[in-house]
Structure formats: structure tokens, C-alpha cells
Image (cartoon, rainbow, N blue to C red):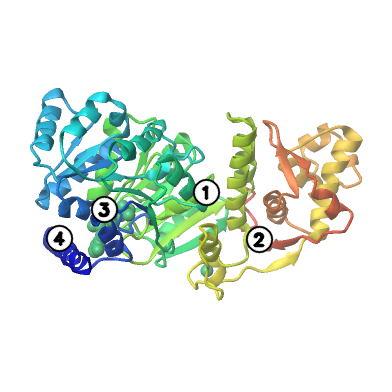
Amino acid sequence: VTEELGAAGSEVLATLNRVFGYEAFRGRQEEIIEHVVAGGDALVLMPTGGGKSLCYQIPALVRPGTGVVVSPLIALMQDQVDALRALGVRAGFVNSTQDFDERRTVEAEFLAGELDLLYLAPERLRLDSTLDLLSRGKISVFAIDEAHCVSQWGHDFRPDYLSLSLLGERWPDVPRIALTATATRATHEEITQRLNLPAARHFVASFDRPNIQYRIVPKADPRKQLLAFLREEHPGDAGIVYCLSRNSVERTAEFLTANGIEAVPYHAGLDAGTRAAHQSRFLREDGLVVVATIAFGMGIDKPDVRFVAHLDLPKSIEGYYQETGRAGRDGLPSTAWMAYGLNDVVQQRKLIQSGEGDEAFRRRAAAHLDAMLALCETARCRRGQLLAYFGQEPDATGCGNCDTCLTPPETWDGTVAAQKVLSTVVRLQRERGQKFGALQIVDILLGKRTAKVIQFDHDQLSVFGIGKDLEEGEWRGAIRQLLAQGLLAVEGEYGTLVLTEASGAVLRGEREVPLRKEPKRPAASRSRSA
Ligand code: ADP
Ligand code: ZN
């Protein structure tokens, strides 16, 4: 057996050298490949850019038969197959973009045993015709890429993935390898169960991306902050800027272009031709910035993305990690930069409450958001927090390559400030039966006689003007942090503030509230976008 494994081992390395032109395996690639070559099932959890593709491509080349790759990324199949063909690998794909003749040709190649790799979209495997075709050929390995798409909890759920459990039943002797970059322990378990892979060996790579510097800054004037960041740190670099809405994608791309930074928009509202053109420009040109919604990026393999910037808060840590993970695949220093503010918290909480889905769905969405907020508000190492989220032991001394390690944030005792905010919310509700959003609360605390304050007689409240000791930005920061800590909640479509169960302890003086210090803002800016 040892001899056999040894022989497979050298063949595996020889294939890496000869076909792919790489000298050595990375991380656990070799272990994974040898396990699959020997016929074992595997679940591979590896961050984006970690080198998952080789984990099934080499077994497909080394084992007799065709490796069948299930992938939801139809738009990339042509590119993947072209790239493999350029290396002399006999690869083909079957999907809905092909005409009848093209499909026929690929099918004939498969049946004749002339394909090393066959890429299929998951919906194909629901068709009897596809299953029939597969059973008439010889299959070396099944690879299920983006395996987290089987998870109903995740944001990429594809119902067609559920039918992939039948592969093991129909082809019990063909090894299966499921791969994903998104994986908390709950997701691993769901993948194992739904894909029916109880005997699969789990290969969990480190999720650390040491060359990515994580930074999260308070949002003041996000586009200007972005521009300054790009000019100071990434002039001429390629990167991705993520925004939540199509509208803000468009406006940000225009803003950057008007300020001398070449940027193109990318979102699902653009026609397919424009999207494809912008994507291929990004891949081919140097130093282009793509401003995009999260529709952009899945499966994009551009090694020299120097920065990923977020102008809006991602909905979960998984999303944040996956999006920022598109930076620095070449291992060179890169930046994950995000501007985050009070409105992000309010917006996202509102979205969850008014969004579709049942109570359980909302609870999960809220838990995802809470974890994301905790990352934003932490005074400790960001990388440590990220890794801990993925079940990995962080470095106790900090990473030295995130903002909180580089410039540890100051904290202050925000108990009294928190009490002032909470009492204002309570007064409005108890004395007036009113609920207001953060802007009005801050104006009341600062004692500002705005039109809206006068209109509602809020200058008559006993709390009017009790917060002159802090600046507007500091109050906004305090409210943002109270929301993140669950000491305050957002309600309804206007995002009004209400107390939570935990608020009482703060009001009664039973609980202290440490807060991060907000960096001082330029005095002139009274931006309400934060
Ligand atoms: P993933 O699918 O995990 O995001 P890929 O399989 O696309 O990652 O690999 C990312 C990049 O790393 C690709 O450009 C790939 O060619 C390269 N790569 C993978 N394995 C190796 C290796 N052993 N040596 C050198 N480059 C590698
Ligand atoms: Zn750190």
C-alpha cells in the first residue's frame, strides 16, 4: 500500500510540475489530492485564493476517467475551460449558454473518454438526460465547487445543490470532493449532511490571510474618505469598492472617475454585455477600480487586487471575509478598508425587520449582523476576531497588521453618556408617547433648536441640552456602539430608537458601558451620512 501511495504521490507532484508548471504544493493541497486519488471523499474548506481548483483537477488527471465538476458559476466556465485547454488539459463544459451542436460535441468527447474534466451547472444534474449521459461514461471524481451553496442558511443558497446528494447513491465508487471558502462549523455540518458525505475527511485550511491589512474607519463623508484612502495608499492600483445599492455604485463610480481614478460600475441592473465588458476590463487592465454590489466577484481570479473597500456594512462576517478575500491573492500586501457608521446599523436592522423570511430567518440574520458589528466595534485585534469566528485560535498577542493592532483605540467610560441617550429615549416614549430616530435624539442632547425640535416642543424636555459635553460625532458614535452592543434597538421603517431588555441595567447604574473613542472630525463637516 505504501508503495502504491508513494507512486501516486510522485505522479501527483509530476502532474503539478508538468501540467500546471508549479514547483510545489501549497498548504494542504498534496494531502487532499492524495486522499482523493486514493478514492476517499473530502470536504475542503480553504479561503478564496487558497488553491482549491488543483485539489480536484489533479485527481481528475491522475485517476482514470473524467472528473465531473459541479459549479454554479456558469459565466466563468468558458474561461476556466479555456485556461485548462491552454495547459493541454482536455476540458469541456455543458451549460445553458451552449447551442445543441456544441453540447453534442462535448457529450461525444465525454463518452469517448476524451475528457479529463467536464464542468456542469448544478441544474443539469436534475435532468435524467444528464444522469443518463454520466452513467454511460467513466467518471474519475466528482467535485462540488462552492459547496456552501447547499446551505439554506447562507446567502448563496441554490436549491439545485440539494439534489447532489444523489451522486453518492448512484456512483458509490466515485470519490467526491466538496469545496468551499465559506465555512463556519455550522456550514461544514450542513454540507456534510446535505451532500451526504458522512465519511468525507475534512481538510480545514487556515483562514488567515496575513498579507491583508484589515481596517475599519468611522464613516463621515464616505466617498471623500475613500478618495483620500485611494490617493494616499493605492494610487494606480486595481481594487474593488463594494456598495449596497445600485444607485450608490453608480454615483461612487462617477465620483471616482470625476476625481481622476478610473472606475467602472458593476451591478445586476446593468445589461449582461456591460457587465461582461467591465469584468473583463478589470481582469485584463492594470489599475482599474470596479465599484460593485456583491453581485461582483464570486469566482473572480485576479491575483493583484490591491484593495477591497466597503462603503456599506456587509450583512455577515462570512460575506465580509469572502469579499475582502479577493484582495491580495498573489500574497503581496493588500488592504481591506471599510467605512462604517451609525446609519449602517440602523439600515441593516431595519432591513432585517421589514425584510422577507420567517422569525427564525430574522433571528439568524440578526445574529449574523451582531457578529459583524462586534468586529466593527472591537477594540482588540480584528484578525483575531475574524479567525475566532471561523473557529480558529487567534494569536494572543495580536497580528500587528490591522488597525486596532497598529493604533490601539482608546476606550472611555461611556456609562453616563449611555444613560443620557437611554433616558432621552425613555422620556420621549413615557412622557410624550413618541419614538424618534438617532438624529433627533442627538439634536435634543446637544440642545439644538432645529425646526423639528421646535415643532415637537422637544426643547421643553428635561433632557434637552444635557449632552453638550460631547460633540455630535461622539454622540453618533455612542449611539452606534449602543446599537452594536444591544443596549438600544431600532424599530420600524423610520428606524426609531427603542430600549432593549439590557437597557434597564444601564439606566439603573448596574452596568458599565465602555466605548471606543471616536476620532475627531473636521469641525466644518456636519455630514449626516454617517
Ligand atoms: P480558490 O479556488 O481556492 O480561490 P484557485 O484554485 O483559483 O483558488 O487558486 C488561486 C491561485 O493560486 C490561482 O492563480 C492558482 O493558479 C494559484 N495556485 C494554486 N495552487 C498553486 C501552487 N501549488 N503553486 C502556485 N500557484 C498556485
Ligand atoms: Zn491585529
Q: Are marks 2 and 3 in contact (CB under 8 Å)?
A: no
Q: Nearer the viewer, mark 2 or mark 3?
A: 3
Residue 280 place in picture, x, y as percent: 24, 43
Viewer-proximal residue among 409 and 57: 57
Disc on the earlier residue, 4 or 2: 4
Q: Secondary structure at mark 1?
A: helix
**Residue 115 relative to residue 312: left or right:** left
* Ligand 1 image position (quadrant): bottom left
Q: Which residue is mark 1?
A: 186
Q: Secondary structure at mark 2?
A: loop
Disc on the earlier residue, 3 or 1: 3
Disc on the earlier residue, 2 or 1: 1
Tell me which amino acid carries mark 4: Thr
Q: Which residue is mark 2?
A: 518
Distance from the alpha carbon under mark 4 to that under mark 2: 54 Å
Distance from the alpha carbon under mark 2 to that under mark 3: 56 Å
Q: Are marks 3 and 4 in contact (CB under 8 Å)?
A: no
Using the image, tell me which numbered label, if any, was put on residue 15. Answer: 4
Q: Which residue is mark 3?
A: 39
Q: Residue at x 42, y 31 (%)?
A: 159
Tell me which amino acid carries mark 1: Ala
Tell me which amino acid carries mark 3: Gly
Disc on the earlier residue, 2 or 3: 3
